[in-house]
Amino acid sequence: GNSVTQMEGPVTLSEEAFLTINCTYTATGYPSLFWYVQYPGEGLQLLLKATKADDKGSNKGFEATYRKETTSFHLEKGSVQVSDSAVYFCALSDENGGSQGNLIFGKGTKLSVKP
Amino acid sequence: DTEVTQTPKHLVMGMTNKKSLKCEQHMGHRAMYWYKQKAKKPPELMFVYSYEKLSINESVPSRFSPECPNSSLLNLHLHALQPEDSALYLCASSQTQGETQYFGPGTRLLVL
């Protein structure tokens, strides 16, 4: 079945540090891949997405590249800010994978950025 | 505009109460979703409506009753809940089932 594995948190960084949050997936079809962010006390916001191999999603300085050969979709940002402190969820949607196209989430990675 | 709204923002209810959560979107999306999220966990899918018909029910207890009165609205009726039902309830919508989902801010529910 489909699944998503994210690196365990929490991740604590200083402001302006480089961020990588690893995400790998297992899927039987050709999934779309997503990163969602959840700020404290809020719902999920779509951060970025990629729908096919080698696509790069980007938003607010965050990037992730859909790597089919390594089944990965790692999230990166060159210089984090205190306001990036949140929980980040990697997710996939695979219409042909038996989950009817519904989102399969990773467990989430909590990021804390210190000034 | 990718806004999904949810009311109320917070809800406290006793185990014998009946209450409803509401979700609304005006993006013309034809799929709407209810999720339950416990602290420090990812959201868990509860129900999916596609073209106003219930498409998926993830074996949710009958004390949760969804309703989709029209393509813009989704309700979740609550009755005789248990304390373990306390959670953040998230609504989402997408153009059609399987496409990119956009989430609302959630309703934080406390069952006493």
Image (cartoon, rainbow, N blue to C red):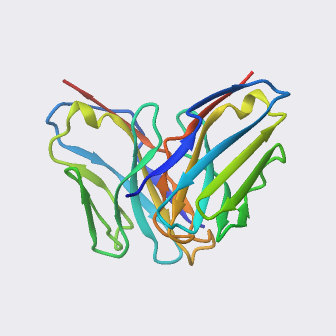
Measuring from the top left, give residue B33's x and y in whole percent: 61, 57
What residue is at 66 percent from the left and 42 percent from the top? B21
From the viewer's side, name the closer residue of A12 and B79.
Answer: B79
Q: Quadrant of the C terminus of chain A?
A: top left
Left or right position of A111 against B21: left
Measuring from the top left, give residue A16's x and y in whole percent: 14, 36
Measuring from the top left, give residue B30's x and y in whole percent: 57, 69
* Residue B69 vertical placement versus B21 (above, below): below
* Residue B96 vertical placement versus A46 (above, below): below
Q: Quadrant of residue A104?
A: bottom right
What residue is at 61 percent from the left and 49 percent from the top? B35
Q: Quadrant of the N terminus of chain A?
A: bottom right
Q: Quadrant of residue B88?
A: top right
What residue is at 40 percent from the left and 60 percent from the top? A34
What residue is at 20 percent from the left and 35 percent from the top? A81
Left or right position of A105 against A7: right
Left or right position of A35 against A106: left
